[in-house]
Amino acid sequence: MITILITTYQWNASKKYDVDKLNDEEKRWATVQNLLLEVTLSPKPIRSTNYFRGIFFDISRAQSFENFIAFCVGLNILVLCSEFYNSPKWYKDTLEYANTVFVVIFMVEAVIKLIGLGPKMYFAFQ
């Protein structure tokens, strides 16, 4: 059933419509729809004139900061996946400690971005 739906959708999506059969209003509508599909609106972050917020903005937009956070996310995934049944207490304690460290890192990231970008821009990028 799902295969039929997907095949039908792909066939309809690839089917070309005869533009000559459209009236002028339909052609204008189709042109506007195509233009709207090409437009992407995304807010552009602007650095604050406040010195303190400007420093946090620069940190939050730095590629090294983003790379560090991405590395922490990957490492956190590995830590979360490394738990196993009947593991020793020291191992469980180490994982718990590592999870706490990652929570702190991600909270600091959120605070840096909230201060640097401001709440409105921070949530627009999420």
Image (cartoon, rainbow, N blue to C red):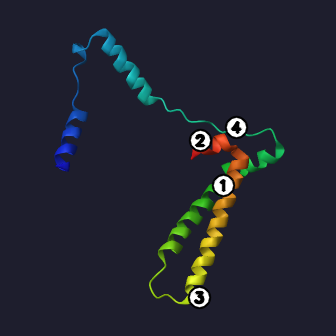
The residue labelled by disc 1 is 110
Q: Amino acid at mark 3?
A: Trp
Q: Amino acid at mark 4?
A: Ile
* Residue at 37% across, 19% down: 31
Please provide percent x and percent y for residue 100: 63, 72
Q: Quadrant of residue 7?
A: top left
Q: For numbered disc 2, what is the local secondary structure?
A: helix
Please provide percent x and percent y for residue 24: 31, 9
Above or below 102: residue 63: above
Going from N to C along the chain, the mark reached first, 3 or 4, is: 4
Viewer-nearest of discs 3 and 4: 3
Q: Alpha-carbon distance for marks 2 and 4?
A: 13 Å
Answer left or right for 72 relative to 6.
right
Q: Which residue occupies the foreground of this view, 122 or 57?
A: 122
Q: Which dot marks residue 90? A: 3
* Residue at 78% across, 49% down: 55
Answer left or right for 85 relative to 51.
left
Viewer-nearest of discs 4 and 1: 1
Tags 2 and 1 touching, CB below 8 Å = no
Q: Alpha-carbon distance for marks 1 and 3?
A: 30 Å
Q: For numbered disc 4, what is the local secondary structure?
A: loop
Q: Alpha-carbon distance for marks 4 and 1?
A: 18 Å
Going from N to C along the chain, the mark reached first, 1 or 3, is: 3
The residue labelled by disc 2 is 124
Above or below 18: residue 82: below
Above or below 114: residue 105: below
Q: Which residue occupies the foreground of this view, 107 or 72?
A: 107
Answer left or right for 54 relative to 81.
right
Viewer-nearest of discs 2 and 4: 2
Q: Which residue occupies the foreground of this view, 67 or 1?
A: 1
